[in-house]
Amino acid sequence: MPQEIQHEFDHARRTGFGPGAPVRRLHARAPVNRVAVAPGPNVSADGPPVWLVTGYEEVRRVLADHARFSTRLQFGVGPSDEKSDLARPRETVGHLTGYDPPEHTRLRKMLTPEFTARRIQRLAPPVEEVVRELLDDMEDVGQPADLVEMYARPIAGAALCELIGVPLDDRPDFVRRVQRQMEPGLTPRQRADARDSYTGYLGALVRRRRKDPDEGFIGTLVREHGDEFTDEELRGACTLMFAAGLDNVSGMISLGVLVLLRHPDQLAGLLENPSSADRVIDELLRYLSVVHAPTPRVALEDVTVGGQLVKAGEQVVCSIPMANRDPALAPDADRFDSTRAPVPHLAFGHGIHYCIGAAMARLELRIAYLALWHRFPGLRLAVPPDEVAFRHNAVAHGLEALPVAW
């Protein structure tokens, strides 16, 4: 048994763009480490040791091996051949990340057509319209402006509402409900109340679309699959999209702007050649890796990873930021280089749980970055760089605020 390392396992302890110092130290020791979770800001008591996987090849292997690493067991649900959701916590019904095959296969097969690049492209006009309105508002309010509050968060929220079909009048209040349950420092009761507030709204929307399906995401699934999707599964699928897409995309927009401002030569290359946006975005996704870790896995049998024996029933957590900075993925991986050839990074995960909304996220980022600098070619920080505050204790990496001028 390797020596256990006492470590406050807090994914959000990131400062700057890359993984935090504790994870870097562990990675320097080995690509797989036994970590004893210690009490901290996000951990109220000692938890059982977990395996922290930080090496690129090792993370990729764990994420690809759904036959030996379960996400379903993480939620305390029975064996993967159990087809009933009766034992599953209500708030996780319909969450793809908490299912193993064959349940995962059934749900993802029905959901995937709604997230193809071709289908997602239909969102481009309404997202572009929202972006224009937000830029108009920024210009009217004047400088300095907080790019997080006035631009990044509203784009992510509006795109998700457009996809799901939340009525225009309901959107501001609904997004506030979603953001409320993600706030750090809430008591378990407060978090549960906040979660119930927005999942209750989604449940009502699903029932409405069941009776009167429209052309949106929920209505389309109802028309094409009928009772193959339960109301709870539809609600859960929508809930997961907001949980995975709101903070992640808003964090990428604001952090990406900051990275580009700190690399003016690469920003100039993007502005001179907008067709390079996809390559620039791909490097930003790798470099920033705003998702601290995907859903933890539970080993279904004894398996050796990175030279370490992981026993059946033990929990495995993968560090996406560290894996994406591993030299095994790319040389000089700690450097942001938008001219490098694309590499198979893990920002959207890997295997059967690869992010189903990846095409939508890329669309939002492309529109957000290009429109921002088209409107404000002289965009710059309105505060010294060391005064930009990174987000702590959050679901996804990001910024508290990004004051800019133009």
Image (cartoon, rainbow, N blue to C red):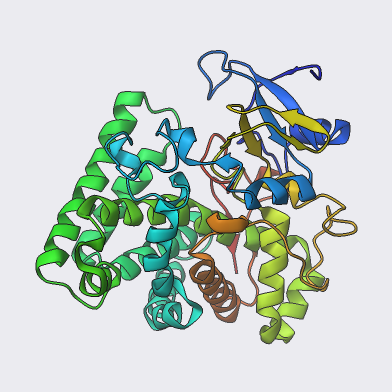
The reply to whether residue 146 is visible in this rendering is no
Q: Would residue 123 be found to the left or right of residue 214 on screen?
A: right
Q: In which quarter of the view is residue 272 placed?
A: bottom right
Residue lying at the far front of the rendered structure: 81
Which residue appears farthest toward the right when viewing the image?
Answer: 331
Whole-percent x, y for residue 316 in the image: 63, 34
Identify the image quadrant of residue 312. Answer: top right
Residue found at x 29% / y 46% = 177
Residue 92 position by quadrant: top left
Image coordinates for residue 40, horizontal then vertical, percent? 58, 19
In the rendering, at what x and y percent does residue 295 appear? 54, 42
Q: Position of residue 257 (x, y in %)?
A: 63, 63
Compared with 73, 368 (above or below) is below
Residue nearer the viewer, 182 or 119: 119
Q: Is residue 272 above or below residue 157?
A: below
Check the image and report above or below for 232 versus 51.
Answer: below
For the point 45% across and 67% down, the residue is: 138
The C terminus - image quarter: bottom right
Count of marks overlaid on the render: 0
Q: Nearer the viewer, residue 22 or 147?
A: 22
Where's the N terminus, which quadrant?
Answer: top right
